[in-house]
Image: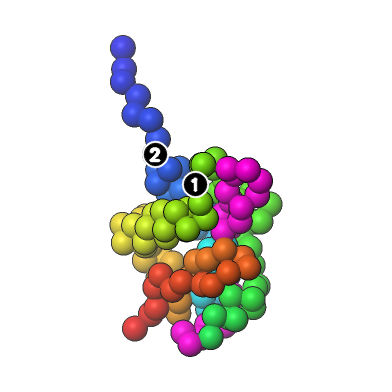
């Protein structure tokens, strides 16, 4: 008789990111933007896009998409009854955790910058290459 640990949302996000960045090259990618969506009642999605530019002072760089790493077709999705501010705070905390300890964190941090935000909202920088 075995005990099974229920996977946390971080575990699921980590698995999703590991599956993407195990095989996806970052050639030509200057920055990464994690885009959040509120799909329908209590349903949220996250995609990641690679961009051709990065500007720490002008978040329009996130519009310069060159790849979606197939995440637009297969986003990370979950259900949660919460306001968007809570979802954003939780998601950025999970992404910061991955950037600190995730399997492909070093690979991701080869780009100039990483941000996260709702598609029609402000972008928060999670990482800037020094």
Mark sitting earlier along the chain (1/2): 2
Q: Tag 2, which secondary structure? A: loop
Q: Which mark is residue 82?
A: 1
Report the residue at 36% width, 66% height from top: 106
Q: Which residues are magenta?
A: 36-57
Report the residue at 47% width, 58% height from top: 85
Q: Main SS type for the magenta part?
A: strand
Q: Nearer the viewer, mark 1 or mark 2?
A: 1
86 vs 8, nearest the viewer: 86
- Circle 2 packing at 10 Å, graded few (<14), some (14-19), many (20+), is few
Query: Total marks drawn?
Result: 2
Res 25 seen here: no
Q: Position of residue 65 (x, y in %)?
A: 65, 73
Q: Is residue 40 left or right of residue 27?
A: right
Res 65 seen here: yes
Q: Position of residue 43 (x, y in %)?
A: 59, 44
Find out whether the residues at labels 1 and 2 contact each other: C-beta distance under 8 Å. Answer: no
Tell me if residue 19 comes above or below residue 93 in the rendering. Answer: above
Tell me if residue 56 comes above or below residue 47 in the rendering. Answer: below
- Residue 45 is covered by the magenta coloring: yes
The residue beneath circle 2 is 8
Q: Tag 1, which secondary structure? A: loop
Specify the quadrant that holds the C terminus: bottom left
In three-dimensional space, the C-alpha distance between marks 1 and 2, rounded to whole angstroms, equals: 17 Å
Instruction: Report the coloring of the rendering.
Output: rainbow
| Direction right: furthest residue | 73
Q: Quadrant of residue 118?
A: bottom right
- Circle 1 packing at 10 Å, graded few (<14), some (14-19), many (20+), is few
Q: Position of residue 68 (x, y in %)?
A: 63, 63
Q: Position of residue 47 (x, y in %)?
A: 58, 57
């Amino acid at each position: 008789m075995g005990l099974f640990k229920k996977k946390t949302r971080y575990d699921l996000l980590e698995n999703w990111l590991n599956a993407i960045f195990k095989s996806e090259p970052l050639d030509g990618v200057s920055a990464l933007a994690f885009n959040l969506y509120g799909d329908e009642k209590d349903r949220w999605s996250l995609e990641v896009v690679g961009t051709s530019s990065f500007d720490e002072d002008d978040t329009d760089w996130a519009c310069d998409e060159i790849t979606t790493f197939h995440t637009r077709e297969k986003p990370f999705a979950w259900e949660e009854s919460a306001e968007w501010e809570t979802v954003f705070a939780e998601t950025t905390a999970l992404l910061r955790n991955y950037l600190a300890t995730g399997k492909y964190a070093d690979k991701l941090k080869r780009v100039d910058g990483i941000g996260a935000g709702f598609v029609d909202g402000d972008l928060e920088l999670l990482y800037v290459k020094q």
